Image (cartoon, rainbow, N blue to C red):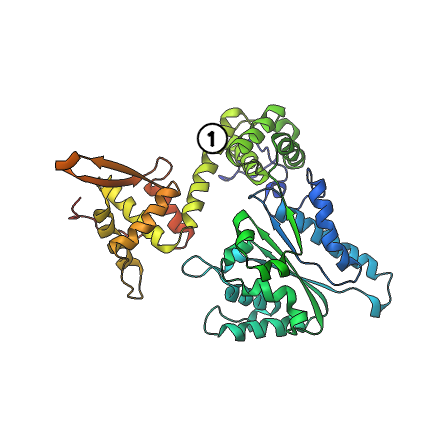
Amino acid sequence: MDDVNSIFADDVELIKNAEVLEEDYTPEQILCRDDVLQQYTSVFKPIYKGRPPQNAFLYGDTGVGKTAATKYLRENLERDIERKNEQLAEDEQITLNVVWINCENFTTGDHKTSSYQVAVGIVNRLRDKGNRITGTGYAPQDVYDIMYEELDSLTGTVLVILDEVDKIGNDDTLLYELPRSRDIGYVDDVRVGVIGISNDYTFRKNLSPKVKDSLCETEIKFPAYNAQELLDILHARAELALYDEAYNYETISLCAALAYQEASGSARRAIRLLRRSAEIAEENGSEQIEEAHIRQGDKDLEYGNIVESIVDQDDEKLYILKALAHLEQAGLTPARTRTIHTAYARVVHTYDTTGKDPLTQRGMFNHLSKLVMFGFVNTIDHNKGVGGGQWNEHEFSDDVDPDKVEDAFADRNLEWLDIDVRGIDN
């Protein structure tokens, strides 16, 4: 490839269309999902026919095609309605408004979200930038009233897609009222349909019966891809994204096999791995993706997955992990609970500007136990018998280290401040 003399250029280029390997790419055809796609299409059919919309609840692991299928059907629905309207009289034409909300993007300081925050998000999706509302300072009912007023200012059908809807947790007010908003009388001029998308199998079970009746009109389970399906999906992406000489069958097979083994059949993981492997090959000046590039790419992704898991923890657990990071760097791990609590308290005083007191040692220990359960921290039991006593010490698991915790802080837009752990008795 002809390139200017640039420090950013590689000697070889293996990727011809990087967009195909991005998460927001919508393929022209959804592979290996014929059964669920047929069921899912039936949810959208009433809208195309000008009838009241259905509500649906989608669930399945990360990377099994829920969001991709939703984007695919949405784009096809909007295109086909536009074509149909060309043949209809103006007063018979179908109007569709889509509001797509990722509930993960509306988390609060405790890294949780709520019906209130999602309602704020819906309002701001429907308003011009200069007329948006803040996430605080309004009574919940006022926010809901504003939301329904904005929805009712539209015409036709409004399809609200709530991705990662499980982030709402137990605060399911919106999930009950929004699908029934016309029946309840909150809106008069539009018909509202809701699609909830969840990675959490237990979320559906924990919904109240009234929410299940409203939201789960149609339930669609997206199973994990098997090894052959991952191979088919990855091969289709590789044909579009990579130059022919950049890969071979063995390359695709290894990426698919690793994603199947390590990520429960996640196409997202397989595609990420293919992209990272191609990037590593380019960086090394290789004209073809080799096994070593894939193995290194797999390690890089695993590092990122651990950091992402740390980012998902609430503030208290994040503070505990930071305390452990500084204790480890000072050579004070494994550490007893009281030692961790002292370091944790110093972290809280450094980061919390509201004057909130740190949790008690017992309260902190409850969060520490969760970190053990999640696999971030290991517990070492000591038993010296009747005379010596029993106690526990804690340290990072093999998958976690101070660098990963620091990267997680950066992803949460938190500055990595120094914590002085000198003088703490272990």
Q: In the rendered image, which quarter contains the C terminus?
A: top left
Write down the residue under mark 1.
296
Residue 106 appears in the figure: yes
Please state if 300 lies on the left or on the right of 405 as rendered: right
What residue is shown at x 46% (from left), y 70% (from top)? 136
Q: Is residue 208 above or below residue 241?
A: below
- Expressed as whole percent of the image width and height from the top left, the position of residue 65 reads 63, 44
Which image quarter: residue 309? top left
- Expressed as whole percent of the image width and height from the top left, the position of residue 123 reads 58, 68
CA neighbours of label 1 inside 10 A, class few (<14), some (14 to 19), many (20+): some
Residue 419 appears in the figure: no
- Expressed as whole percent of the image width and height from the top left, the position of residue 187 reads 66, 73
- Expressed as whole percent of the image width and height from the top left, the position of residue 397 reads 34, 37
Number of numbered discs overlaid on the protein picture:
1
Q: In the rendered image, which quarter contains the N terminus?
A: top right
Please state if 348 lies on the left or on the right of 173 as rendered: left
Which image quarter: residue 394? top left
Which image quarter: residue 64? top right
As rendered, which of 46 and 404 lies closer to the eye? 46
Q: Secondary structure at mark 1?
A: helix
In the rendered structure, which amino acid carries the disc numbered 1? Gln
What residue is shown at x 41% (from left), y 53% (from top)? 412
